Amino acid sequence: MSATPLALHRRELRTFEQLPASLPPLLRRLYAARSVLPQQLSLDLKDLLPPSGLKGIGEASRLLVDAIAAQRRIVIAGDYDCDGATGVAVAILGLSALGAKHVGYVVPDRFRMGYGLSPALVDVAHANGAELLVTVDNGIASLAGIAHAKALGLTVIVTDHHLPGTELPTADAIVNPNQPGCGFASKALAGVGVMFYLLLSLRAELRARGVLTVEPNLATLLDLVALGTVADLAQLDYNNRILVEQGLRRIRAGRAQPGLLALLEVAGRAPEKLSASDLGFVLGPRLNAAGRLEDMGTGIDCLLARNVDAARPLARQLDSLNRERRTRTTEMAEQALDLTADSTAVGICAFDEHWHEGIVGLVASKLKDAHHRPAIAFARAEETGVLKGSARSIAGFNVRDAMAAVDAAHPGLIIRFGGHAMAAGLTLPEAGYADFCTAFEAVCRRTLPSAALERSLMTDGPLQAAELVLDTAKTLEQAGPWGQGFEEPVFEGVFTVSGMRLMGSEQQHVRYQLRAADGVSVEAVDFGGAARALTVGSVIQIVYQLGCNRYNGAETLQLRVVQLL
């Protein structure tokens, strides 16, 4: 498929008179373009939405209080991604701090059990003595698993954030901002965020009953909440920005969980300079690698470690798994791009019998980026004759709804599916792969808006010469957290290349010295840009982000090339 042309758009410049004049003019412009209101400049915990707005949270809290009072065995049923792992850790640490004496966890083996609370996972929890089962980051679609748990006599609380199907599970309580009838103003909570909110409500219930002798500071868990929220690509609405910012502040102050500090150590990152993007690109992949290749228990145990010495060997193991994951991802992505190079499909599907099922989501993401189309990558499951697929979508197309449409039109073609608008998963019989591809393509062609197929890049316009300084980059660092739905500022400009050299172990990156029209000289880095490197004297138009290059104690301004135009 030929590359989709790139259309450059500038963010709408809204009025920002209502924002304080004390803010730097550039920051006022950036905030106004992102619809930030004056009252949203504060990212204090007191500004969080109250837990009471979540449907079902009161009943869930009462069930937990009763279980704690009776010292019943509570088992947390998690998921095998970063959101699920951090959610499990938050649940265990928080419940223990609130008086629960018997708390354990189970996580599905993705290769044998698949996603969610399956009957098989319920059996594992039951064998571990579970009396109260609490899901984290899953459960809303686990109809069979929860029915099985109820048949075994277990009390079940579902905490989830995924979109529900037409039928809800028969749990004793459901806490999910996206369930029908829930009026919680933020629908963007990640799974770990829902669990944190349940702990806030539980603490309030214990306080109301007068049985809370020592009130724990649940803010100590916000580093984990921030990590799971960013790694799961949750929209950074105002409520999530508070959660993420508060978690980042704890990490930067050196007050993170020992497991996070150990992960930063093996990654060679200083906690005091951590950004929201580091949560997604440094910490998240190392935790996710365990769930993709082996067992997420390693990641959860790292997060639960009582000190850095105990966490360090687990962090090293996660780092090693992540290196293996990177190698496999590169190999599989190259194969997938070759398979789909000439595809004219609107909805891309790809399958290879040798692909690893834990990595197909990353492959789907590479395909989505390369073709600017919804993409699904498939691998063989351990179960004979079954494929597991992972989907990634583009803005304007709900890939989970597309799967629902295929399922409705072709009953039995999909074994199960679930997920978000932008990312979803499914299983289907291998014999039905071709039929699914045809059906998925038909849904994509029928429902995908033509405007969504335009590859576009949103910028915040050009910067003035006086703004191309280190202080601007530092201001932007402190003005976040930036992330999904609250994108880091991206600027555009025309420069002349006055210097160029390749760098990196394989000479794959480019370091430029650029000169603006007014003579201002700046350094820029194009990571992975060796193949498109430009010669000295070239005049280039680039889209870039501002960054601080910190090396040997020195700080300099550095432009990070996003796109050469």
Image (cartoon, helix red, strand yellow):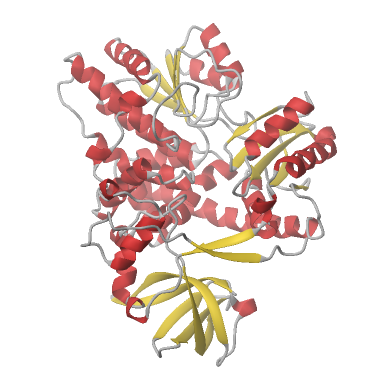
Residue 466: x and y in percent read 32, 80
Quadrant of residue 196 within the rendered picture:
top left
Reply above or below: 544 against 239. Answer: below
Q: Quadrant of the C terminus?
A: bottom right
The image shows residue 441, relative to residue 503, as above or below, that is: above
Location of residue 166 by image quarter? top right
In this rendered view, identify the residue nearer to me: 529 or 293. Answer: 529
Rendered residue at 23%/57% (across/down): 20
- Image coordinates for residue 113, horizontal then vertical, percent: 62, 28
Residue sitting at x 49%, y 6%: 153
In this rendered view, identify the residue nearer to me: 444 or 273: 444
**Residue 376 visible from this viewpoint:** yes
So how many labels did they put on this image?
Answer: 0
Task: Point out the image quarter for the N terminus.
Answer: bottom right
Residue 512: image x %, image y %?
Answer: 49, 83
Q: Is residue 552 visible?
A: no
Compared with residue 142, is residue 115 higher up or lower down, i.e. above or below? below
Q: Position of residue 388 (x, y in %)?
A: 70, 37
Res. 21 image quadrant? bottom left
Q: Nearer the viewer, residue 500 or 520?
A: 520
Residue name at image x 41 percent, y 83 percent: 522
Whether residue 561 sits left or right of residue 477 in the image: it is right
